Image (cartoon, rainbow, N blue to C red):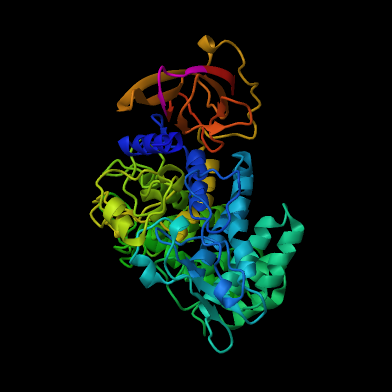
Amino acid sequence: MSLSRSLSFLVLLAILLGQVPSAMSDDGLDYGAALGKSLMFFEAQRSGKLPTDRRVWWRGDSALDDGFLQGVDLVGGYYDAGDHVKFGLPMAFSLTMLSWGAIEGSKEITGLNQMGNTLDAIRWGTDYLIKAHPQPNLLWAQVGDGSSDHYCWERPEDMTTSREAYEIDQEHPGSDVAAETAAALAAAALAFRLHNSSYSDLLLVHAKQDELLWAATWLYKASGDESYLKYTINNAASMGGTGYSAQEFSWDTKYAGLQVLLSEVLMDNPKSQYASVLKQYREKAEYFICSCLKKNDGYDVPRTPGGLLYLQQWNNMQYVSSASFLLAVYSSYLTAANLQITCPKARLQPQELLNFAKSQADYILGKNPKSISYLVGYGPNYPTHVHHRGASIAPKSVLQSDVGCVQGFDTWYHRPQPNPNIVHGALVGGPDKNDGFSDERSNYEQTEPTLSAAAPLIGLFSKLYKAYGGPGNSSTDHRQPYTGPASAAPVEFLHSITSSWNQGKVTFYHHQVIIKNVSQKPITYLKVHLENLTGSIWGLNPTKEKSIYELPPHQVLSPSSQYMFVYVQGGPQAKITVLSCY
């Protein structure tokens, strides 16, 4: 066996020997860290040519010929879930929600040093949507075939399934995906306005192709053109905007989001000439709010015994995250306007909406009957058998070979061990109506993550971080970095060897190192030197300097909390020296 193959074999063994949680918090929930984790999922879902500075190390380039057969460049965008289809509708909705979150939580996201990652996540999708819209009456709405894709279990880098592309045009209409694409581009134009005005203008040019209610509302907010607002007024009844009483908000049913947006328009201008219709939108928005908080005289959204909103057996968490985001946003709108809600069974203050949104977020992050975080990579206990092709198969850099369609099922899908790769920030489908959860790869209803479930979390966590604080980064934290002796550093390193094996005459060890914050302040940056490190390492980011590593940028160590990294090598353990810490 060659040296390179030996090393790859050792790395594979290291991956298979154990799953390593990313962060363990023992002093409460950290909404700032949860926000950072959530953004990582979008990097794991990227399709196309990946940047060299990617943070998800186990992903590689994929689907580089998308659109080739149709004579159009459709490379890029996002895979929808644990599969490899690029569905235009949920992708566009996810981008709308990412942008809405960036708009509403701009100050907090910037303060957490996550605005760059947030805008990168949005632009990775909107660049693709611009490609998919080469002319005014043409939109490429999907790449890949769901049926054939689901017959294979392979990494995106190895795809052998059909990459057929599907278009909508005047002869093949699709108003739902066209409108959502317009909404996504308009919302993104707002999100980019203060950061990249020329790109914002480009997005708005592409957005102005559809005028259904949801899209028209975003176009009004992005452009200020009152003709779009007038469209939502004139078509309010005929298109259901003031007639539909929603109890869910999702990529497939957006009435509640529309009603919340137009309620803000009314609150900003109570004497608007359109006030009478806007009040009807607000009444429907508050029907949704009252239903979520069980104040709607019996017409309420069901909950599990543990208190989680429960609407669907399959991927229920997407409805939880989106509803919680709307509750948090509407709370801020009410606060700004000094208003409250009158439900059939109670009068609600803005804080009550935010408190309930917090209860849903806390359930997601581990405060639930199972004591499991449904956000992968957050906390000490989270799903390790996520229904996700890329996460469940060791990467090419380790195996040095492709994994075929059927081979993936035989070798990886059915194996009882945890996934070799952690898909950080993935929000899985979640528990059943009785708070039960089975962490099995085949249990796709509960363990598969989706873009549309993860996207609302950015805005939700930013609102909760603002209201309740957290040990994440702070824009007002000006502490100087620690550069003293390692013995007096505000962290300590707890080293252990979890397993070993022989390869020829060499014994290799799986080293586990826990970094513990022993200070009274959060640590947002840590740089260390690992002397005598000869093997592979996971959990720390390499720098341009040899043997120098840093804590990942999204990771915050609150007081007494811990973070784990691992490495594999033969011989003695590496010596760790703190170079900088603050």
- Where is the N terminus found, in terms of image quarters? top left
Which residues lie in the magenta part? 568-576
Left or right of residue 439: residue 58? right
Up/down of 538 relative to 197, above or below: above
Question: Which quadrant of the view contains residue 53?
Answer: top right
Residue at image location 58% in from the left, 84% down from the top:
169
Residue 561 visible within the image: yes
Q: Is residue 430 above or below residue 23?
A: below
- The quarter holding residue 26 reads top left
User: How far from the left and from the top, in percent, is residue 447?
Assistant: 32, 54
Which residue reaches farthest bottom? 171
Above or below for 114 versus 161: above
Percent position (x, y) of residue 174? 52, 81
Residue closer to the observer: 381 or 278: 381
Closer-to-camera residue (350/390): 390
Residue for point 42% across, 18% down: 573
State left or right for residue 80 relative to residue 219: left
Report whether 94 appears left or right of 126. Answer: left
**Residue placed at 56% from the left, 30% from the top?**
524
Compared across the picture, whether 399 is left or right of 464 comes to left
Q: Is residue 557 above or below residue 254?
A: above
Residue nearer the viewer, 234 or 349: 234
Indicate yes or no whether the magenta region holds residue 77: no
| Outermost right residue | 198
